Structure formats: C-alpha cells, structure tokens
Image: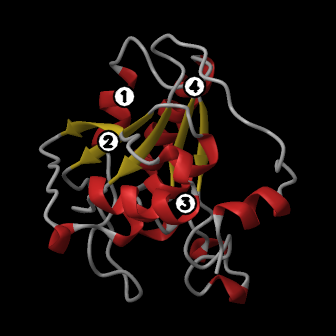
Amino acid sequence: MITLGCLAEIYNYTNFYPKVLGGDKNKIGITGYLDGFANFQDLQTFFADQLPQAVNSTFEVELVNGGSNSQDQADAGIEANLDVQFALGVSFPTPGLFWSTGGSPPFIPDNQLPENTNEPYWLDFVLSQWSLPTVISSSYGDDEQTVPESYARHACMQFAQLAARGVSVIVSSGDFGVGGIGGADGNPADQSF
C-alpha cells in the first residue's frame, strides 16, 4: 500500500515541509471529470490516518460546465478522492482547489474505448481565470486514437498557454503507463494522450 510516508521516502522529501506564502496563486489545483467527486469527509478520514496535523483542513470546489459537488458518500469518486487526498497530503499546508467539470467533447470510438470520456471544458475555463494555482494535477488521460486531431492540437496549445503563465501541470501517464491500452505492441496509434 502506498502511503504519504512511503512517497516521502521514495522521492526523498522526508524532511521537507511546504510553506504557505499567501496570495491567490499559492495553491494546488486538482482536476475532476466524469462525475467523480472529492468527498470532504473522506479527506478527513484520510488525514486522520495519514497526516493527523492536517485534520480539519479542506479544499475549495469550483464547478465547471455543469460540474457538481455531491457530498453523498455513495457518490464519492475513487479517482477524485485519491487525487485530492494525495495531492493535498504531499503539499499540506498549501491550500487546494478541486475543479468538478461536466461534459464531453468530440470523440472517435474504438473497440477498446467505445464511450466518450474526453473533456474539453476545463482548459477553456481555467484559461479564462485571472489567478491560477502554480501547480495543477490531473490524473485523467485519454487514449490518443479516441481524440480527434484538431481537438488534440487545440488542447496542446491550451496547455502551452498554461505553461506560459507559469503554471506547472502534472498529468498522469495513463492507467496502463505510457503505452496505453494495447500499447505493448509498439503501435504509435495505441499510445495514451
């Protein structure tokens, strides 16, 4: 089982403690999609187990494109909870912001991924904001073959705009690593986007 202490040892930051410098930019942003909700009570349970000094700290939620913020335990999202708990756990006491984003964009279905899980709305929203967190974490990814090329190019340009504004975006390499679903065959079309 991976714990906050285990991560600190693996990445050699056992004696590092983030400092909160104040201002709007000193926060970490975490993306959420596909009706995945980060649950406030689950965060407190995680902190009680992993980081007792963080108990009673929480995160802000911003709703994007019809996103919602259900705090019903039955609606808590595994991925959203995991992302918020570990991002806030390793960055405590840095404030956190969770974006709950609704909607899906153009999509090219295939045998591996017949349902649309791509998302275009968060980038448009976040780029319209005056003040952004300096670090944004997103564990969500798309398999490249499901993303129309025009949309992929547009999204890449939007990520470049975030970088130009001084934002570091940390993105997953996919649930199956950089090879993606079926990526072990070496086919570039099978790589995760």
Question: Mark 1: few, some, or many residues within 10 Å (few <14, many ≥20)?
Answer: some
Question: Mark 3: few, some, or many residues within 10 Å (few <14, many ≥20)?
Answer: some
Q: In screen coordinates, is 177 left or right of 88?
A: right
- Alpha carbon distance from label 2 to label 4: 15 Å
Question: Mark 2: few, some, or many residues within 10 Å (few <14, many ≥20)?
Answer: many
The kind of secondary structure element at disc 2 is strand
Q: Nearer the viewer, mark 1 or mark 3?
A: 1
- Kind of residue at disc 1: Val
Tag of residue 8: none
Q: How is the image coloured?
A: secondary structure
Q: Nearer the viewer, mark 4 or mark 3?
A: 4
The kind of secondary structure element at disc 1 is helix
* Mark positioned earlier in the residue sequence (2 or 3): 2
- Alpha carbon distance from label 1 to label 3: 20 Å
Percent position (x, y) of residue 190? 58, 77
Given residues 76 and 135, the one toward you in this image is 76
- Kind of residue at disc 4: Thr
- Do we see residue 39 in this rendering? no
- Kind of residue at disc 2: Trp
* Mark positioned earlier in the residue sequence (1 or 2): 2
* Mark positioned earlier in the residue sequence (1 or 3): 1
- Alpha carbon distance from label 1 to label 2: 9 Å
Q: Which residue is mark 3?
A: 193
* Mark positioned earlier in the residue sequence (2 or 4): 2
Q: In screen coordinates, is 185 left or right of 109?
A: right
Q: Which residue is mark 1?
A: 126
The kind of secondary structure element at disc 4 is loop
Given residues 149 and 179, the one toward you in this image is 179
- Alpha carbon distance from label 2 to label 3: 20 Å
Tag of residue 99: 2
Judge whether 50 appears above or below 191 on screen.
above
